[in-house]
Image: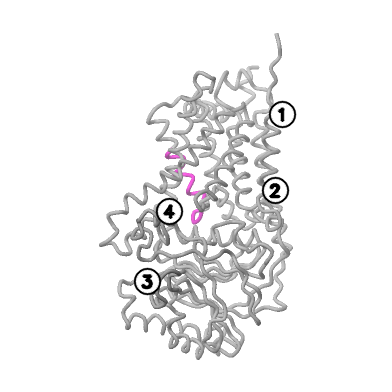
Amino acid sequence: MRIENLLPAAVFRLESFASALSELRGWRRHGVAFAAGAASTFALPPYGLLPLLFVTVPVLVWLLDGVGEPTRSRRRRVLWRAGLIGWWFGFGYFLLGLFWVGNAFLVDAEKFAFLLPLAVTLLPAGLALFTAAAAALSRLFWLHGYRRVAIFAVVWTALEWLRGHILTGFPWNLIGSSFSASDALMQAGALVGPYGLTFFATLIAGAVASFDTRGASIARRIDGNLLTAPAIALAGLALIWLGGAARLSSATLDYSEAMDIRIVHPNTPFARDWDSEERLLTIIGQLLRMSREPTEARPLGPEPGTLIVWPENAVPVLLAREPYVLAAIGRTLPEGSHLIVGSNRAESAPDGPANRLRVFYNSLYLVDDSGSIVETYDKHHLVPFGEYVPLRHLLGRIGLRQLVQFQGSFDEGPGPRTLSVGGIPPVSPLICYEVIFPGKVVAPGERPAWLVNITNDAWFGASAGPYQHFSQVRMRAVEQGLPVVRSANSGISALVDPYGRVLESLPLDRAGVIDAELPAPLSPTLYARLGDLLVAFLMLAALAAAWASRPRRTDA
């Protein structure tokens, strides 16, 4: 009996498909890489089609099979080809995954709309350099069979880690974010964090490509282990899900010392006349009314001791310099209550006159029931080119001060902080973009009882952006074992428990408030204690196993 009859016909069709991919050249090869990268974004929020990675990751691996062997004489050419495949995959991935960034240029379209095509292509093109490097570097150490998938997973994860740290970092849309489609799968983040989830996702999804397209056909080189790697990988995915499901099934939330919170979700659109007195009074009036009005959960309005949370830049004024606004807030707050509110903050320049405000911060204030500011936090992780110009100190020294101090630019705060005020559990504040950085949301040695994230996602409209942003909020909760309170001006406001589950939420394009109780934190997770050390160990172990199991050359 021929061996072909012993194998499912689907395996041979898969081999034919893989071989055809590896033989592609020129624009066809790059077009398939681009399409695979673009399709991979549908595994991420808000779509959550995780099974797509079982197609797109193997496609990338098979395309890399076809660039040739990096012998000494051909190494540069082979690595260039692999890098181009990786770049086109990354360009498709980031272009489709980050297209919503262009919405920000339509807020003041008369001034900035002409920059939209440049913005939505340059950012993906730059980020794709990381995927290009991952493809080229992994191809340099390409082994046979599933070993090359393990090499690829390690190198891809390492480059995603670098993307999250180089030039202030941009760890947005990590492949591991696909696990947030399932509450159970994302629980693994409490052990290995988001980079560990990326490692698992690529290692498991790439198992379909456990056979490579170099050499003889499957029929002539079958060794009985063709389906072993995919079977083990799928079993690993099932174990991750079962472990997460078991964790959630035994999860209990502690409300024994719960604090009442009210999350205000004003859904205030952008307006060009924010500086007008009428617009200012309208915004402040809406926020004050929503802070004290009765709801179904609180028929008499918020009770004494309630913590009220407003979003980032909730009031378009320098709040610390507006005593009348602070007095109105004090009159609104119930006895013993506090307000968390986002506002810009200004100081005079160190080398300038005291009455000239030249240093600005994107800040969070904690205001008590007397209208006094009792704590201040300044955002330290600013958005490049949105809130500051990179290398601005160098640019300022060479005379480009106007470029550095553009309208809307900020100075950075000192770093993560834990705010402790009587009557409120210690809290780590995160303003908008700061919540996307795993392992950097809590000050070292100052573990809080919860996280608060204030944001304004109105820049990005009803696109995928606000959903991607919110999924990262949930991941931070899982990683740290801390509940998260989130107030978005326009976006998704929510209360998230320390397991990353959404307890209460308000969607885009709908104003409202959330009245709830804040659950207690969990004990520090393994990721909270070790950071990325565990995933680094797993990656080294995978490299060692792949290298040790490679076929040995035997002398004739």
* Distance (Cα) linking label 1 and label 3: 59 Å
CB under 8 Å between callouts 1 and 3? no
Tag nearer the camera, 4 or 2: 4
Please, what is the three-letter code of the amino acid marked with disc 4?
Leu
Which disc number belongs to residue 548?
1
Q: Is residue 101 magenta?
A: no
Kindly identify which residue carries mark 2: 534
* Magenta stretch, residue numbers: 34-47
Mark yes or no: residue 172 visible.
no
| Residue identifier under label 4 | 394
Q: Residue 114 sits in which quadrant?
A: bottom left
**Could you say which is closer to the camera, residue 354 or residue 174?**
354
Q: Amino acid at mark 3?
A: Pro
Q: Residue at x 72, y 57 (%)?
A: 246
Q: Horizontal and vertical percent for residue 502?
A: 58, 66
Sooner in the amino-acid sequence: mark 4 or mark 1: 4
Q: Earlier in the sequence, mark 1 or mark 3?
A: 3
Secondary structure state at the residue bearing disc 1: helix
Q: Whole-Å distance between the Cαs marked 4 and 2?
A: 37 Å
Which of these two is toward me, 64 or 121? 121
Q: Amino acid at mark 2?
A: Leu
- Mark 4–mark 2 CB contact (< 8 Å): no
Helix, strand or loop under label 3: loop
Query: Which residue is at a point 39% across and 57% down the rendered structure image?
Result: 396
Residue 269, label in figure: 3
Give whichever of discs 4 and 2 has the lower sequence position: 4
Residue 533, placed above or below residue 27: below
Identity of the residue drawn at 57% across and 47% down: 161
